[in-house]
């Protein structure tokens, strides 16, 4: 199963079960994970860490 199919299946689940409140939580967690990965491997890390 490819990544697009997993995302499509997740949105079908949200639509069928009326669980739209889960979407912002997952989007935030994904964006935060990307920020952590970017901050740990970047020369901009000291500047990103100063935001917190």
Image (tube, rainbow, N blue to C red):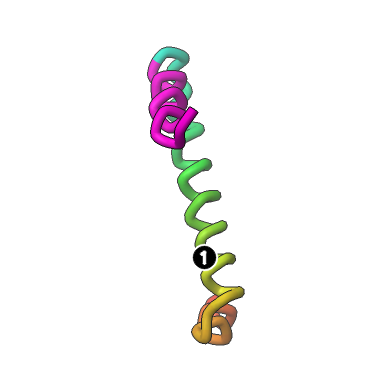
Residue 13 can be seen in this image: yes
Please name the residue shown 41% across and 28% down the image.
Answer: 5
Q: Is residue 8 magenta?
A: yes
Instruction: Please state the horizontal and vertical placement of residue 46, each as a whole percent of the image.
Output: 57, 86
Q: Is residue 30 magenta?
A: no
Q: Residue at x 49, y 27 (%)?
A: 1
Report the front residue among 29 and 52.
Answer: 29
Q: Is residue 20 above or below residue 40?
A: above
Mark 1 Cα-neighbour bin, 10 Å: few <14, some 14–19, many ≥20? few
Give the residue at x 46% y 26%.
10
Vertical comparison of 35 with 50: above or below: above
Q: Residue at x 61, y 74 (%)?
A: 40
Q: Please, what secondary structure does the residue beneath circle 1 have?
A: helix
Q: Main secondary structure of the magenta part?
A: helix
Q: Is residue 32 left or right of residue 5?
A: right
Visible in this render: residue 52? no
Q: Is residue 49 above or below residue 15?
A: below
Image coordinates of residue 37 in percent, x first then y, are 57, 66
First to last magenta residue range:
1-15
Seen from the viewer's position, the closer of residues 2 and 16 is: 2
Expressed as whole percent of the image width and height from the top left, the position of residue 23 reads 45, 36
Count of labels in the image: 1
Splitting the image into 4 quarters, where does residue 7 fall?
A: top left
Residue picked out by circle 1: 35
Q: Quadrant of the C terminus?
A: bottom right
Position in image of residue 32 (x %, y %): 53, 58
Q: Residue extending furthest top? A: 16
Q: Nearer the viewer, residue 45 or 24?
A: 45
Q: Residue furthest front?
A: 1
Q: Residue 16 is drawn in which quadrant?
A: top left
């Amino acid at each position: 199963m490819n990544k697009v199919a997993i995302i499509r299946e997740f949105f079908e689940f949200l639509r069928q079960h009326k669980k739209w409140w889960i979407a912002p939580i997952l989007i935030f967690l994904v964006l935060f994970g990307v920020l952590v990965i970017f901050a740990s491997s970047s020369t901009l890390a000291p500047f990103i860490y100063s935001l917190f």
